[in-house]
Image: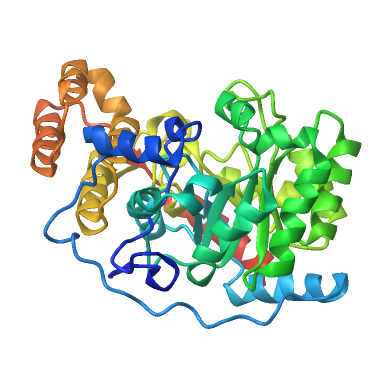
Amino acid sequence: MPLRRLAPLLASPRRRLRSSLNPSLAAMSPAAAHLATAADPDGDLCASAAGSEAQDLDPAPPLPPPPVSAEERVERAWAHWRRLGSPRLLVAPMVDNSELPFRMLCRRYGADAAYTPMLHSRIFSENEKYRSMEFTTCKEDRPLFVQFCANDPDILLQAAKMVEPYCDYVDINFGCPQRIARRGNYGAFLMDNLPLVKSLVQNLAANLHVPVSVKIRVFPRLVDTLAYAKMLEEAGASLVAVHGRTRDEKDGKKFRADWDAIKAVKDALRVPVLANGNIRHMEDVKNCLEHTGADGVLSAETLLENPALFAGFRTKEWKEDGDENGDSGLDQADLVIEYLKLCEQYPVPWRMVRSHVHKMLGDWFRVHPEVREELNKQNKLTFEWLHDMVMRLKELGGRVPLYRKESVLETTLDGLASSNA
């Protein structure tokens, strides 16, 4: 599975684009961002002999030109969605955490499609090193949404043109609620400037051959949310993903996502709608789709702890009452080993690897905090050291299994299949 290069679109055909945004780079000049990644050992690629060589692949064939009418745009939105297989289970965009090796791991365990991490459109369009470090894909990494944050329609279009041949949607992030988004004037803080939001979507929809998707949060008032979603559809969005929390509701464990608001958006729009929020296991998937009528679900934080969620596996926190004998034989340490092997095949910055190891082994580290402390002390990681660390954890005991009930999974999958027919 060779890495896909974007050679026809880059100044140097020997460079690769890589997926994810380092938030600390967003406020820097391109030159400063370049130096920052080079100076940080965790910013270096986890290159290996197996993954150091990439091959140039031909881009996807061009799609028909952008539609000229609203009716045609809706028809094409659904035709494209069905051509992709109407994916129901999607890996959400996560800064520094939905990069290629992690996407491929989630795809192994049931994910139908995936988003890249959020990419900063200005830095992406200006800085070759940022492109080379932050985005990669491969032939098997489809369907794929490439997500950008932006506040300038022309700069966003320039960045989108670079990835257009290698993805199935170019996505605009209108949902990031973090302080860096406020400082950079992007993400959910563009909800205060709806004319700019509209122009960002319109410019892409009028000039790209690949469909435009958007990811949004809800307003405190439902009437504002519906007006917002309809505006995005009218501007040219072919798909809308709705995070059912407001901009101020940042803590997913403290604030439940509003599935009623997502349902209202789905009922109001004519293009595909995805639901984001409260997806912790496959029963949540089934319940969310039934409640909202959405065309698919996104999961983020739960996948970081359990990339096998979409294959019906649950962490101990979410196992069913009385399910003491549901040990699947798989645990998060096994998933870490799989992830590390994928990183050897598809090199990414070490900071991403470190983050995933911490997330997936959190329960193990609570039992053996001394191993976590040893990991934190490592200024420079190697695959050999990480494999040895996982083996030490297994030898120390305190295994934390993942749980799975075939009957529950089959019922959920049957429900998804029937609703997708």
User: Which residue is located at x 53 percent, y 57 percent?
Assistant: 146
- Which x, y percent locates residue 299? 53, 44
Does residue 237 appear anywhere in the picture?
no
Figure check: 5 above or below 304: below
Residue 393, image quadrant: top left
- Which x, y percent locates residue 232? 79, 53
- Which x, y percent locates residue 147? 55, 52
Does residue 43 appear anywhere in the picture?
yes
Residue 11, image quadrant: bottom left
Relative to the observer, which residue lies in front, 158 or 313? 158
Figure check: 123 above or below 249: below
- Classify the position of the N terminus by image quarter: bottom left
User: Which residue is located at x 33 percent, y 61 percent?
Assistant: 16
User: Which residue is located at x 37 percent, y 70 percent?
Assistant: 7
Seen in the image, is 296 located left or right of residue 399?
Answer: right
Seen in the image, is 267 located left or right of residue 80?
Answer: right
- Which x, y percent locates residue 288? 67, 46
**What colour scheme has been applied to the protein in the rendered image?**
rainbow
Figure check: 59 above or below 12: below
User: Which residue is located at x 76 percent, y 36 percent?
Assistant: 191
Relative to the observer, which residue lies in front, 322 or 49? 49
